Image: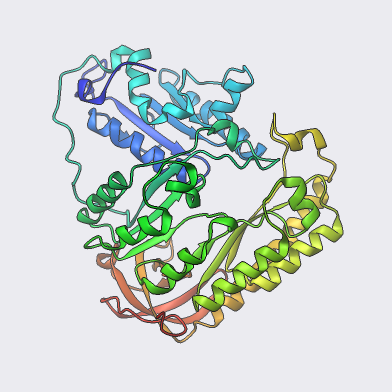
Amino acid sequence: MPGIHLSMVAHWAWGRFGAMVTAAFTTLGCKVNQYETQRILESFEEAGFAIVPFTDRADVYVINTCSVTQAGESKSRQTARRAAKQNPDAKVVVTGCAGEMAKRRGEDFPAADLVVPNRDKLLTLDYLFSEFPEFGDRAAREPRPADQARPAGRTRATVKLQNGCNIFCSYCSIPYTRPHQFSRPWEEVVEEVRKLANRGYLEVVLTGVLIGDYGPRDGSGGPDLPDLIEKLAATIGLERIRISSIELTQVTPKLLDLMRRERKICPHLHIPLQAGDDRVLRDMNRPYLRQDYIDLCLAAKAMIPGVGLTTDIMVGFPSEDEEGFEKTLDVARQVGYLSAHVFRYSPRPGTPAEKMGDPVHGDIKAERSKRLTELVTETGTEFRRQFLGREMRVLAEGPVPGGGLLRGFTDNYIEVRFPGPQSICGQLVTVRLDELHMSCVAGEVVSETALRLPLLEERV
């Protein structure tokens, strides 16, 4: 790891002909990657780089890659090649899980001038200056203030609590690309959220590779996840706290009780299912049975009226037959998902499931994906239907491309589209939900003040 610190290399970055040096960033994969890309981008801004869209010609391209599926890994490689083609003189910097997987296999990453290890990705700028010192050989500048105003067009902030995974699901490469499990100090998280609230963010999304293991559960000590969230809820100016993907075994009664009591916590849980058949779950090395999953989701719905449930589901795992897939459909019906990320199994090199081969034909995977997606579309429509006619608070996030409308999400993660001035973007407003439209609801702003309204009944 380079022995260079940001305080030593905060510079004006001027190119060969006196122009400011530019950097472009793109992210593939999860919310953890999105958070980490933003942190890397901010370090480049502090060093004086001009940030440009990834589609523009840039001097440095930084690609935070994904390897969770074969498609994600292929797209990561394609993205690096596209960046190199956009500007053959640029330096293409790769980090993230696909870069880590290539390193594990002893392979080069096509078109990459520099591959930064996953564990050091927040030091990407240091690696760049160490490998290509011409980028750091500039005149010093003052760092950007940490509490500057919220950037235009950004309404919610992602905060990473934890990194690393030790579950070792048989199909997953993440424990190999992010093997060291640890939690950030709670004081550091609280301070980051305070600064975000001061910058005008009303909502933070808490994320991590295994977020429910925050604190004592991964041996880091300090408060557990519910206790940390309760501390964050005391932040002045912060209105919504949303929990990102969390494993079934980590949705504890303590967490559900806190969600029931604390209005700042969004009534929305993303709990990966992956499969609804016990035999497939066993082969996946998932630590629960289908009935455990159903019981937890129904308990959450009873305890927190109006809670939105979303999930990840894999189709075409090597031991999934038609009967097993039907059981997955049955779980989806019983739970009544708002939405689901449905994806097809692809073997990940070095995982136990790779030894099982890939016996489910691609056409069968496609057909199962289609059936499951159609079912979740139906359950999502039924979930949204129960809120028609209600007034709910919505975080106005920005305009719908080409639609002349604004879009935003309710506390329980229903997408709403509505007419209104762009001046309310970034604000919580009260919207009446009027009409179902595909995967969203059309609504009307009834107040530019966000009323604290119950979802189905008071959460007390």
Quarter of the image where one finds residue 322: bottom right
* For residue 117, above or below residue 232: above
Quarter of the image where one finds residue 20: top left
The C terminus: image quadrant? bottom left
* For residue 174, above or below residue 149: above
x%, y% of residue 381? 60, 75
Q: Residue at x 55, y 71 (%)?
A: 300
Does 173 sit left or right of 136 as displayed?
A: right
* For residue 67, above or below residue 336: above
Instruction: Please indicate, yes or no, whether residue 306 appears anywhere in the rendered image.
Output: yes
Looking at the image, which is closer to me, 331 or 385?
331
Quarter of the image where one finds residue 141: top left
Q: Residue at x 40, y 21 (%)?
A: 90
The N terminus: image quadrant? top left
x%, y% of residue 136? 26, 17
Total labels: the figure holds: 0
Does 231 sit left or right of 291 as displayed?
A: left
Q: Residue at x 28, y 69 (%)?
A: 421
